């Protein structure tokens, strides 16, 4: 008698979805919309905005030419000819912060015009990387990734390489270091600061946010190197720019539901949706001149107006289901994490820092290359379960389930398995899901084995239908970079 198939249980792993809804994403959406709305304003007003944010005057003839037939290598050209476009989004403190160039939020956005999908990857600010921004490039030092943008504008190191100097030096330095971690080559960057975020919300007349619990943070940083307490009640409330910034930034709330990065991410998601709703309303469009002024002095980018328009035109009707949001994370209370761990990565045990499990970044690169899965494979809707047959890595099945939950795979909760030296894909379907089985075998370096509900003997709690991946000791070693 066949056992009924339980519905895939995925709620435990949705933290990665929430984590990637960060402040830069809000500002990017607003920036693109505002620039296009600004095109209806005076030429001088729009030129002032473009010059302040990109460092170049508006070239109307060139923009028209680019819109009709984009030059090879431009964002418009790539989107038109089915080539990937990668944008780095950075959120920094700005001049009101005691560390104005540190990037509090880092997100890599990869646009795939062939499949009409977007991958958004959140990179935690405490991830440590061996930076090589000096001349010669063989000189390296360990630092948090959030310092990469800062290097060209401060005296942290001597002899910054020439390519990381000048107006866009910080953006290029951040692209280089985030590129090492993700394996992505970035086309452009956008850096925004807290002032832009706050002023944008104020210009819109505030936003309405609903909190699931109260938020009390007694060590919220003020603008003079100290702290001041913030308090927000549970439920729906109207927030001005400063209040919205406080809710987005708070890291030390006394409420368990609000104190972690995951609680912070949930709040940022709500704020993003509120800003999007306000900006795209009739009232939001009428505020275009004020929005331009709010954003003009506090955004830096090397994108041209034609770049922004190309992205906007491509994605303006993109449904949310086409956006895959993932995050590089480490285990925290209530979460399993994925490709990172808390440890001493070379900055001393007294510093909060995250290290890649695989120090070569090979596993991160491989994972991010695979996030946008083949839609034909996803259409098979194969029931999948990851089980851990490795005795050397407790919780690896949970990490992998969390990694692939946002991709659209139909995943059940993971379970333990008897020890296995080799990784296997147990096919209980009789070959009903060939594309999925082939992909799993390729990604994990596994052998596909035909299985029945009794042979091989299933582990406790294991499903005996669809596809089951038994993670062996061989894959665990690769995951660890060994």
Image (cartoon, rainbow, N blue to C red):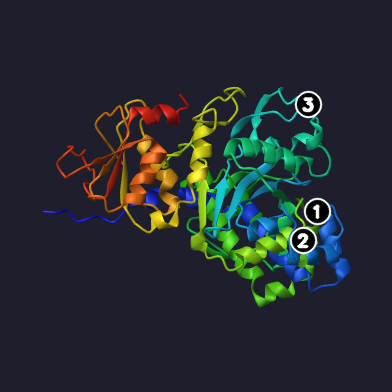
Q: Residue at x 69, y 48 (%)?
A: 187
Residue drawn where x is 69% and y is 58% of the image: 77
Q: Residue at x 32, y 26 (%)?
A: 391
Query: Alpha carbon of mark 1 to alpha carbon of mark 2: how far?
Result: 9 Å
Q: Is residue 405 above or below residue 306?
A: above
Q: Nearer the viewer, residue 35 or 226?
A: 35
Residue at the outermost bottom position? 282
Residue 124, horizontal then vertical, whole percent = 58, 40
In space, the residues marked 1 and 3 are separated at their CA atoms by 26 Å
Name the residue tied to disc 1. Answer: 54
Graded by Cα atoms within 10 Å as few (under 14), some (14 to 19) or many (20 or more), the crowding at tag 2 reads many
Q: Earlier in the sequence, mark 1 or mark 3?
A: 1
Which residue is the site of mark 3?
A: 135
Picture coordinates of residue 209 (x, y %)? 56, 63
- The residue that mark 2 highlights is 305
**Callouts 1 and 3 close, C-beta under 8 Å:** no
Earlier sequence position, callout 3 versus callout 2: 3
Quarter occupied by the C terminus = top left
Evaluate if marks 1 and 2 touch, with contact meaning CB atoms under 8 Å apart. Answer: yes
Image quadrant in which you'd find residue 309: bottom right
SS for dot 2 = helix
Question: In terms of image quadrants, where is residue 198?
Answer: bottom right
- Neighbor class of circle 3 (other Cα within 10 Å; few <14, some 14-19, many 20+) is some
């Amino acid at each position: 008698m066949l056992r009924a198939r339980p519905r895939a249980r995925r709620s435990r792993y949705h933290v990665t979805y929430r984590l990637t809804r960060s402040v830069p994403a809000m500002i990017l959406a607003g920036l693109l919309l505002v620039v296009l709305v600004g095109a209806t304003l005076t030429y001088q007003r729009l030129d002032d905005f473009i010059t302040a944010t990109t460092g170049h005057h508006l070239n109307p003839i060139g923009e028209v030419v680019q819109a009709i037939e984009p030059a090879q290598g431009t964002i418009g050209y790539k989107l038109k000819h089915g080539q990937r476009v990668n944008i780095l989004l950075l959120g920094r403190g700005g001049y009101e912060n005691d560390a104005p160039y540190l990037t509090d939020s880092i997100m890599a956005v990869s646009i795939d015009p062939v499949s009409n999908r977007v991958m958004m990857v959140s990179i935690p600010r405490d991830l440590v990387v061996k930076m090589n921004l000096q001349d010669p490039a063989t000189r390296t030092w360990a630092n948090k990734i959030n310092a990469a943008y800062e290097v060209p504008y401060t005296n942290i190191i001597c002899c910054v390489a020439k390519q990381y100097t000048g107006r866009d030096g910080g953006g290029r330095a951040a692209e280089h270091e985030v590129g090492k971690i993700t394996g992505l080559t970035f086309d452009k960057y956008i850096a925004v600061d807290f002032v832009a975020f706050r002023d944008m919300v104020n210009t819109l007349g505030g936003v309405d946010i609903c909190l699931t619990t109260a938020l009390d943070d007694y060590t919220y940083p003020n603008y003079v190197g100290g702290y001041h307490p913030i308090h927000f009640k549970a439920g729906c409330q109207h927030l001005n720019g400063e209040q919205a910034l406080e809710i987005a930034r708070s890291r030390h709330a006394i409420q368990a539901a609000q104190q972690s990065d995951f609680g912070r991410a949930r709040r940022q998601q709500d704020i993003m949706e509120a800003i999007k709703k306000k900006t795209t309303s009739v009232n939001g469009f009428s505020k275009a001149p004020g929005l331009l002024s709010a954003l003009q002095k506090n955004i830096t980018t090397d994108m041209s107006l034609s770049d922004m328009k190309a992205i906007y035109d491509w994605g303006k009707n993109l449904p949310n289901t086409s956006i895959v949001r993932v995050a590089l994370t480490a285990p925290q209370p209530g979460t399993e994490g994925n490709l990172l761990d808390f440890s001493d990565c070379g900055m001393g045990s007294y510093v909060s820092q995250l290290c890649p499990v695989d120090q070569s970044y090979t596993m991160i690169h491989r994972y991010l290359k695979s996030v946008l899965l083949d839609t034909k494979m996803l259409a098979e809707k194969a029931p999948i379960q990851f089980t851990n047959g490795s005795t050397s890595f407790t919780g690896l099945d949970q990490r992998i389930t969390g990694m692939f939950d946002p991709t659209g795979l139909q995943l059940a909760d993971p379970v333990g398995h008897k020890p296995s030296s080799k990784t296997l894909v147990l096919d209980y379907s009789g070959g009903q899901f060939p594309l999925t089985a082939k992909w799993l075998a390729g990604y994990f370096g596994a052998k596909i084995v035909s299985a029945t509900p009794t042979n091989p003997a299933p582990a406790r709690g294991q499903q005996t239908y669809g596809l089951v991946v038994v993670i062996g000791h061989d894959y665990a070693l690769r995951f660890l970079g060994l």
